[in-house]
Image (tube, helix red, strand yellow):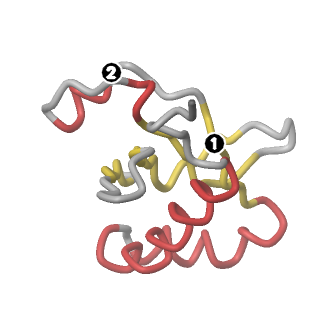
Amino acid sequence: MTDSKQKLNPDTAIDIAYDIFLEMAPENLDPADILLFNLQFEQNGAVELVETADDWDQEIGVLIDPQEYAEVWIGLVNEQDQMDDIFAKFLISHREEEREYHIIWKK
């Protein structure tokens, strides 16, 4: 018997987040951040699947089950290969039939 709640493949989650990011960034980020991202992403950019935090309710006002979502961060890494400039954090549901997502943009 297969699990009806199959999790997103990490590459798929990353692709979904990056596509949404590119589409929505101009409306949600400062022009200076967009310029910084465009100039540095090729060398220092990162799109990473991270462990889903359990405190999203503080950001979106709704309790979520971390097992039902993938969390993806988009940003720039420093010399120590740590993401220290995060432009967006995505919460993407594993449900393919009704894909739901939430975004926390850099302020």
In the image, what residue occupies the spot 58% across and 27% down?
Answer: 51
Which residue is denoted by mark 2 in the rendering? Answer: 55
In the image, what residue occupies the spot 57% across and 54% down?
Answer: 13
| As drawn, 64 above or below 83 | above
In the image, taking residue 9 as reference, residue 78 lies left or right, namely right
Q: Position of residue 78 (x, y in %)?
A: 78, 45
Q: Quick one: 23 or 8, which is closer to the camera? A: 8
The numbered mark, 2 or 1, whose residue comes first in the sequence reads 1
| As drawn, 35 above or below 12 | below
Q: Check disc 1 and report its element: helix, strand or loop.
A: strand
Q: Check disc 2 and report its element: helix, strand or loop.
A: loop
The amino acid type of the residue labelled 2 equals: Asp
Where is the N terminus found, in terms of image quarters?
A: top right
The span from disc 2 to disc 1 (Cα, nearest Å) is 17 Å
The amino acid type of the residue labelled 1 equals: Leu
In the image, taking residue 34 as reference, residue 45 lies left or right, namely right
Which residue is denoted by mark 1 in the rendering? Answer: 49
Q: Quick one: 5 or 65, which is closer to the camera? A: 5
Quarter of image, res 66: top left
**Residue furthest to the front:** 1
